[in-house]
């Protein structure tokens, strides 16, 4: 399998993200993750077209509270190798990659934090693949794709744009989905893994990966995840940005609440768009840390 490996010098200047990457070999490629702190792990999964850099503000608060943070880069993103064949990218392959991380690092008693495509991937791991390893779930601006879900007009515009632009303009997508425009050096950090069109198969392939009918690939697995989640009794925390144009609060976020029967009413994150970790990362990290403290006090 042919892969693209982003030159290391592209990552030499990442504002606020000085964590050392760790690498492992899987399925013919080198995959990257950050692993900081001690204690029960908090695993944070990114989506499209971001990478582990998205969680840098969240990590700070969670690490200060005494937790371990494990933040991988999906294949095709961040410091991980990037298969150049668009056909490699699938719901199954991304799920296998994250399952292998849990098994290789022997992660147990996990608090799983998911956003965007991190949700379908992570929730599948947490329900169908390795449920015994996940103890708690935190979800933000995400969902499960069954082929029956209604995608917003904002999402359809985004998918059509990516289809027309194989050399995906990463920075433009990041800026367009943040409430406050990030500084130029932060936008450059999001662009760092993707220097040319050949490196962008991952960002290109996520939008068409979403099944828009129950007959499409991934829909049956998404339906199985949704059914498992509706019966799940593990503690969960649900947060949603107040200004997400892709997955709007009222039409999507309120419905996703039904997937989390043990969660309190979702927490609205003000002054935040789809990449709410960028807009309000410190607040989100503090909310997660406080919630984990409450969960610890409830344990027998």
Image: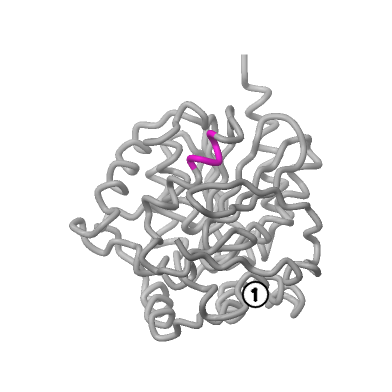
Q: Quadrant for residue 159, please give it.
A: bottom left
Residue lying furthest bottom:
164
Q: Residue at x 57, y 60 (%)?
A: 81
Per the image, the residue denoted by label 1 is 191
Q: Give the side of residue 231 with respect to residue 249, left or right.
A: left
Residue 50 screen position, x and y as percent: 58, 65
Any magenta on residue 257?
A: no
Secondary structure found at label 1: helix
- At 68% from the left and 60% from the top, the residue drawn is 53
Quadrant for the C terminus in the image: top right
Q: Which residues are magenta?
A: 99-103
Counting every numbered tag in the picture gives: 1
Mark 1 crowdedness (10 Å alpha carbons): few <14, some 14-19, many ≥20: many
Q: Look at the magenta stretch and give its main secondary structure.
A: helix
Residue 214 shown left or right of residue 38 in the figure = left
Q: Residue at x 47, y 45 (%)?
A: 122
């Amino acid at each position: 399998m042919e892969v693209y490996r982003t030159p290391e010098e592209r990552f030499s200047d990442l504002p606020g993200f000085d964590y050392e990457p760790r690498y492992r070999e899987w399925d013919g490629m080198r995959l990257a993750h950050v692993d900081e702190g001690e204690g029960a792990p908090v695993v944070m999964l990114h989506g499209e077209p971001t990478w582990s850099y998205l969680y840098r503000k969240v990590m700070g608060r969670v690490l200060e509270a005494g937790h371990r943070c494990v933040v991988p880069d999906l294949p095709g993103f961040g410091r991980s190798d990037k298969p150049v064949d668009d056909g490699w990218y699938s719901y199954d392959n991304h799920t296998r990659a994250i399952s292998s991380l849990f098994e290789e690092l022997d992660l147990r008693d996990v608090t799983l934090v998911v956003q965007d495509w991190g949700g379908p991937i992570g929730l599948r791991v947490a329900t169908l693949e390795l449920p015994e390893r996940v103890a708690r779930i935190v979800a933000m601006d995400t969902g499960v794709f069954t082929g029956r879900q209604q995608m917003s007009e904002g999402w359809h515009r985004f998918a059509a744009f990516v289809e027309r632009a194989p050399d995906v303009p990463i920075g433009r997508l990041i800026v367009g989905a943040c409430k406050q425009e990030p500084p130029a050096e932060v936008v450059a950090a999001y662009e760092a893994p993707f220097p040319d069109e050949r490196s962008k198969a991952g960002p290109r392939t996520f939008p068409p990966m979403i099944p828009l009918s129950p007959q499409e690939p991934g829909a049956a697995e998404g339906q199985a995840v949704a059914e498992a989640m509706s019966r799940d009794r593990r503690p969960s925390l649900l947060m949603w940005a107040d200004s997400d144009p892709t997955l709007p609060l009222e039409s999507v976020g309120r419905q996703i609440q039904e997937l989390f029967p043990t969660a309190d009413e979702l927490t609205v994150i003000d002054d935040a768009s789809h990449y709410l970790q960028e807009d309000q990362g410190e607040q989100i990290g503090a909310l997660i840390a406080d919630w984990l403290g409450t969960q610890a006090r409830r344990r027998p």
